[in-house]
Amino acid sequence: MLTKRIIPCLDIKNGRTVKGVNFVGLRDAGDPIALAKLYAESGADELVFLDISATEERRKTLTDLVMGVAQNVNIPFTVGGGISSVEDVDTLLKCGADKVSVNSSAVKNPELINQLSAKFGSQCVVVAIDAKQIDGQWRVHLVGGKEPTTLDLFQWAKEVEKRGAGEILFTSMDHDGTKDGFANQALARLSEELNIAVIASGGAGKAEHFVDAFIKGKADAALAASVFHFKEIEIIALKELLQSQGIPVRL
């Protein structure tokens, strides 16, 4: 059985790590390079770096910061935000990223997923999907959750897989920052319907929530931000708990 991954997420705005609730009310969480280095040394399996205002501000990802993080970590490092072309990805990989995460640009131009997968390999392509429930249906949202679409989460996830994505990063906007646990029912359905890895995001508040994401949600990896940034959960202690519950992790 493959080991389950624990992934701290650095949401970046104006060069600083930030965290909010339900995608709003952002507060400062520290220097991204210092945090990245700390996580790499503290047992994190991977890191995700999301330049959360790049798409809204219609600019490219902060390449200098990507380079700074890459020089300070020795674990796989995914970068997202403002990526809309093969050239953008080429630049970020040259700056030290191992994978890229595309979200709004993939919805607006689904062919981009095919292009990225063909050029860089599916293992390099993560499609991030931000969704919330509207009238009982999970609807995909764009531009940092600000722009609703009529796309169904599960149908879009299947299309993304067909087009060559290697992983899906599913964030429940309803659960984001609430610390009430992950969207395990939706996670389980995604995990059952897809053959690629599903990363759970949105809702981590305590270590038991990760146990639920892996057992009830059948996730391959779980991502969190504030509980790690503000030292509410230590990664090694979390992994020891997961192992005690029969969940395979890298210690």
Image (cartoon, grey):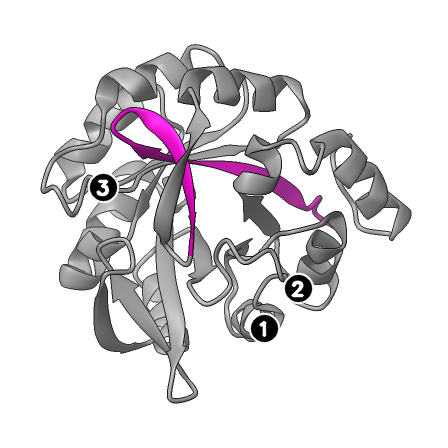
Residue that sits furthest to the left in the current view: 58
The Cα atoms of the two marked residues, 3 and 1, are separated by 32 Å
User: Amino acid type of disc 3?
Assistant: Ser
Q: Which residue is drawn at 64% across and 51% down?
A: 205
At 70% across and 33% down in the image, what residue appears? Answer: 235
Kindly give the residue lying farthest to the bottom in the view shown: 135
Q: Which amino acid does label 1 sit on?
A: Glu
Nearer mark to the viewer, of 3 and 2 = 3
Q: Does the magenta stretch include residue 15?
A: yes
Numbered circle sitting on residue 53: 3
Question: On the picture, is 105 further left or further right than 78?
Answer: left
Q: Contact, CB < 8 Å: mark 3 with mark 1? A: no
Magenta stretch: includes residue 22? no
Mark 1 is surrounded, within 10 Å at the Cα level, by few (under 14), some (14 to 19) or many (20 or more) other residues, namely some
Q: Residue 147 shows which numbered tag?
A: none
Per the image, label 2 sits on a secondary structure element best described as: loop
Which residue is nearer to you in this view: 84 or 52?
52
Determine crowd level at label 2: few under 14, some 14-19, many 20+ residues with C-alpha closer than 10 A.
many
Drawn side of residue 251 relative to residue 155, left or right:
right
Within 10 Å of disc 3 (Cα), the crowding (few <14, some 14-19, many 20+) is some
Measured from the top left, where is residue 73 in percent x and y? 50, 16
- The region drawn magenta spans 1-21
